[in-house]
Image (cartoon, rainbow, N blue to C red):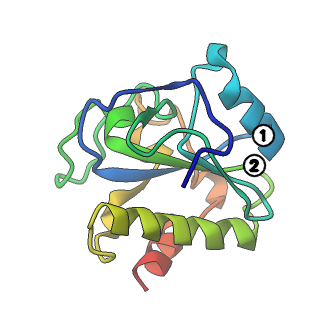
């Protein structure tokens, strides 16, 4: 897939990819695309999913997007990347955030995209522990709550759909 909305905010990976991290943008699809295109924002995602299911590809999958910020390794001991969250994750954002829940189209496309990325990495679809939320990586704990804060997205249901 070629980039549809390139962001200047990315770098070489510092670690092999171990996880797929889900985010909310906190704003509209248009504002998220605008923000990630601005070098001064120092923010990007590999992909942003619009409410209608359109996908904007912003950073090449083999590069590190800048969306995790200060990070820590999730509690799951199968991960080995420590504080290298940006370098060890692929980051997919759903446009929006509380109080408006993600649309069914966004969730369907998220599941398809997560499944495709797991296959690209040759990970079994049963390894859904690799799907994490920004809340799981942000440091200090509680700095970020997306995408599950306020019951915005049921990441457990997303993982189950990916493995189905």
Taking the spot 49% from the left edge, 30% from the top edge, the residue there is 66
The picture places residue 47, in percent across and down from the top left corner, at 58, 48
Q: Quadrant of residue 11?
A: top left
Q: Count the marks: how many?
A: 2
Q: Quadrant of residue 28?
A: top right
Pick whichever, 63 or 17, lies toward us: 63
In the depicted structure, whether residue 159 falls above or below residue 41: below
Answer left or right for 100 relative to 2. Answer: right
The picture places residue 38, in percent across and down from the top left corner, at 69, 20
Q: Which residue is labeled 1 in the image?
A: 27
Q: Which residue lies most toward the top here?
A: 40
- Assign the C terminus to one quadrant of the image: bottom left
C-alpha distance separating marks 2 and 1: 5 Å
Taking the spot 58% from the left edge, 65% from the top edge, the residue there is 110
How packed is label 1: few (under 14 Cα within 10 Å), some, or many (20 or more)?
Answer: some
Q: Which mark is residue 96?
A: 2
How packed is label 2: few (under 14 Cα within 10 Å), some, or many (20 or more)?
Answer: many
Taking the spot 46% from the left edge, 34% from the top edge, the residue there is 68
Q: Secondary structure at mark 1?
A: loop
In the depicted structure, whether residue 106 falls above or below residue 60: below
Q: Which mark is residue 149?
A: none
The picture places residue 75, in percent across and down from the top left corner, at 26, 48
Q: Secondary structure at mark 2?
A: loop
Q: Quadrant of residue 130?
A: bottom left
Is residue 154 visible in this depiction of the protein? no
Tell me whether the residue at label 2 lies in contact with that at label 1, contact meaning CB atoms closer than 8 angstroms.
Answer: yes
Answer left or right for 68 relative to 153. Answer: left
The picture places residue 118, in percent across and down from the top left corner, at 36, 65
Pick whichever, 153 or 33, lies toward us: 33
Answer left or right for 12 relative to 34. Answer: left
């Amino acid at each position: 897939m070629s980039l549809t909305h390139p962001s200047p905010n990315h770098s070489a990976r510092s670690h092999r990819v171990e996880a797929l991290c889900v985010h909310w943008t906190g704003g509209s699809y248009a504002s998220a695309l605008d923000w990630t295109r601005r070098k001064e924002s120092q923010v990007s995602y590999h992909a942003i999913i619009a409410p209608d299911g359109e996908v904007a590809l912003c950073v090449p999958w083999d590069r590190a997007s800048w969306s995790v910020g200060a990070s820590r390794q999730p509690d799951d001991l199968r991960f080995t990347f420590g504080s290298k969250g940006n370098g060890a994750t692929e980051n997919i954002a759903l446009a929006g955030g509380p109080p408006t829940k993600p649309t069914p189209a966004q969730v369907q496309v998220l599941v398809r995209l997560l499944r495709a990325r797991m296959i690209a990495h040759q990970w079994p679809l049963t390894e859904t522990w690799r799907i994490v939320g920004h809340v799981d990586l942000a440091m200090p704990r509680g700095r970020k709550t997306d995408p599950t804060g306020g019951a915005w997205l049921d990441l457990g249901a997303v993982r189950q759909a990916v493995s189905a």
